[in-house]
Amino acid sequence: MSVPKGDVFLAGVGGQGTLLASEVLCDAFLLSGFDVKKSEVHGMAQRGGSVTTHLRFGPKVFSPLIEPGKADLLVAFEKIEALRFAHYLRPGGAMVVNAQEIFPPSVATGQERYPQDVTERLRAVTDRLHMVDALAVALSMREVRAVNIVLVGAASHFLPLPEAAYEEAMKARLPSMIVDVNVRAFRAGRGLLRGQSIDS
Amino acid sequence: MSVLEKKEEIRLLSGNEAIARGAFEAGVKVASAYPGTPSTEILENFVRYEGVYAEWAPNEKVAVEVAIGASMGGVRALATMKHVGVNVAADPIFTVSYTGVRGGLVIVTADDPELHSSQNEQDNRHYAVAAKIPMLEPSDSFEAKEFTRLAFELSEKYDTPVFLRTTTRISHAKGVVRLDAPVAPAFPPGFTSDPAKWVMLPVNGKLRHFVVEERTKALREFAESWDGNRIEWGDRSLGIITAGVSYQYVKEAFPDASVLKIGLAWPLPVRLFREFAAGVTRIVVVEELDPHLETHVKSLGIRAQGKELIPIVGELDPRIVRQAITGEAIPVRAPEAVPSRPPNLCPGCPHRGLFFALKKLKVTVTGDIGCYTLATLPPLGAMDTCICMGASIGNAHGMEKALGPDGAGKVVAVIGDSTFLHSGVTGLMNVVYNRGASTVILLDNDITAMTGAQENPATGKTLHGKPTRRTDLPALCRALGVEHVYTVNPHDMTQTEAVLRREVARPEPSVIITKAPCALLPEHRRKQRPVYEVIADLCTGCKACSRLGCPAIEWVPFTPEEATAAGKKTTQKGMARISPLLCDGCNQCPPLCKFQAILERRS
């Protein structure tokens, strides 16, 4: 049996928890017998700037970086970050985008407007666009920090892993006191896209 | 998938975690470092292993000196730093090359092509050549651990310090690593006096130089036969010579090509290159940054292509490599135009208050390395220079001497607590000694923040988390001869501005310490803090608060119709809003509002 391979590109804003989300994803792949590599940048980029993670899985992975135009799945934690890295998506690739808007400095200071046409522009990139309101889900759970795992749950529909792999990964990775809330966040996130067409 | 057969023995580790694991398995007893991206996590992970000692040193030179001392004392020792840290540590490094070691000694240099978090993208393979020190260069986490273990073996076998070089995409990329058991030391700790080896008087140093040259010859022979330098024969029409992460990009872009993979960046083999060259039609050298391998290959008279195809600036990736070698552009969707999102000072950052006040003084600000370097970006735009760790004070003093009386009261140096202790202290000593009058602002946020919250000599805690004596910053400045040392709360911008104006005008050196904890510190985050909000009816859209550049303060633009609907003048262009998710309650913005529209949220 051939082992599937794929490239997952995560984009967000420093402080949104993209790092932990990608850790959980990597662990889930590793536990399921895949080779995995991921790459991200720490340090200065964390300070409220754009942050990205390149995550690659398959029978054998060489490059830790995804090439532009090759990602199978783009998971964006913020709307304009989806647009900023949309060129990484392969033709026909899927996007899971958090509907949250976080103003970049030029918008927050009134020099320009937050683009009003993000969803339309994303739809022009792919018709496999799935907008989700992960923040609302996290707030309804009274845990704003769970946005990242809600998104992992939504994104899980596009990845070749059983649900149990993610939960096992969270149990192994997270401090025991926050496992429960994150498992619930994952399930709620997964529920957001249940029933939607996810085919390529 | 052979590496995945025994699940209990494999882990997904970053290169830095793998190096820490490798050092533990190699039996390292003493490790010292100054934090610096992308190297920081090596010691943060290493310290978690049983039975090891690890510390944050005030700077990289001290870290290397500590590691040398531990090696002299007969244990395996590690010093880690970012690429520019090697510049600071170069002095002991060039001479420990001569003395050699007792316990294995490894120096990690974590380079940063693409300048993700650095002031330059220097290629530290040059240091291996210049200091005549062997350098291993892993191409993923798996090799990072294996090469770390090997580095200690080579160090003891060849009586030499060994460099281990990573780049950001090695240090901060995760990959599968197989764990092994730690090894026992080959000999007990202990120092044996041997002046001919350890005391580098000229007479001894000259003799050791001969030893170094012989050692390099022996290591070159090792390089010929070690399987970390290896030929992977494939299609003979294209032969690629590569090393480090570039190897992965090559394998991705040209899975069928013949590849010569170099794992020992210095010294380089000769026969292996000739063998490879004889077996392929076209040779391309694929390496990030400088033409290190290429220069060596060409010095052997081998015809090869390199930097005429492969960019010398920035990182590579598989696409860049493929395009460079095939010469064919690979079409890809153009990036969308969207508002940029540069890194910013956090909500509640104490530095913001200082720079807001400082900007009003219209002085030239010589800056330094830390989060506060971000104050150079708009809207604060309050920093004029940044060269390297500790440079701000010397820069201010030099500028003052250049400008003469015209410059009096017009130049201010800004430096963080950790950076000051790293290499600002001597700069301040120089100001006092040489009759300068600089005003130095010492930003004391109680942590080394930029690299992700590391302790330093002024925080009162060690890397092991143990309480320790704090360096008293005001007392240190006074001991250097600065008479005027004042501490202010930077969140109180009125007080800060008043003290700044007074001290900048003073024709003598002075130090202003802005003291408030980093907003990301757990002890700060645990505190009950207010959340502020903008009372919409009172906001006139004057943007006074926006000038802080706080990420929590958002501008809501109006059309004339929206303005009317909101009960505002049609000319009002918008109003401010504070994000309750981001507000840190620092109280910097409420006093800026003339209309008292910013109030503490009550619900």
Image (cartoon, coloured by chain):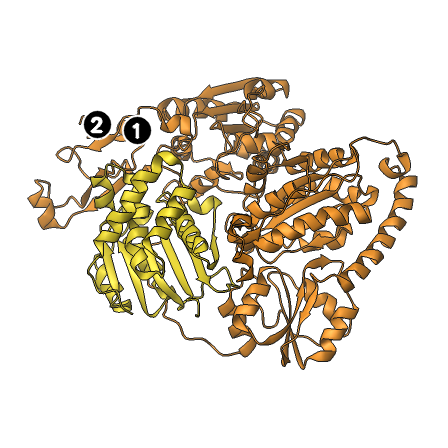
Chain colours: A yellow, B orange
Q: Secondary structure at mark 1?
A: loop
- B127 above or below B52? below
Instruction: Look at the numbered disc 2 and give the secondary structure of its residue.
Output: strand
Evaluate if marks 1 and 2 touch, with contact meaning CB atoms under 8 Å apart.
no
Q: Which residue is mark 2?
A: B599
Residue depicted at 63% across the width and 56% down the height: B138
The first of marks 1 and 2 along the sequence is 1
Question: What is the distance, in whole Å, between disc 1 and disc 2 at their CAs?
Answer: 10 Å
Query: Does residue B307 appear left or right of residue B595 in this picture?
Result: right
Q: Is residue B340 above or below residue B510?
A: below
Is B334 placed above or below B525 here?
below
From where the camera sits, is residue B464 visible? Answer: yes
Look at 52% across and 22% down and name the residue there.
Answer: B506
Q: Which mark is residue B585?
A: 1
Instruction: Identify the image quadrant of residue B236.
Output: bottom right
Visible in this render: residue B550?
no
Position of residue B5 measured from the top left corner of the image (x, y, whole percent): 53, 57
User: How far across and down, in percent of the image, does residue B1 sit?
Assistant: 52, 62
Q: Badge 1 sits on which subunit?
A: B
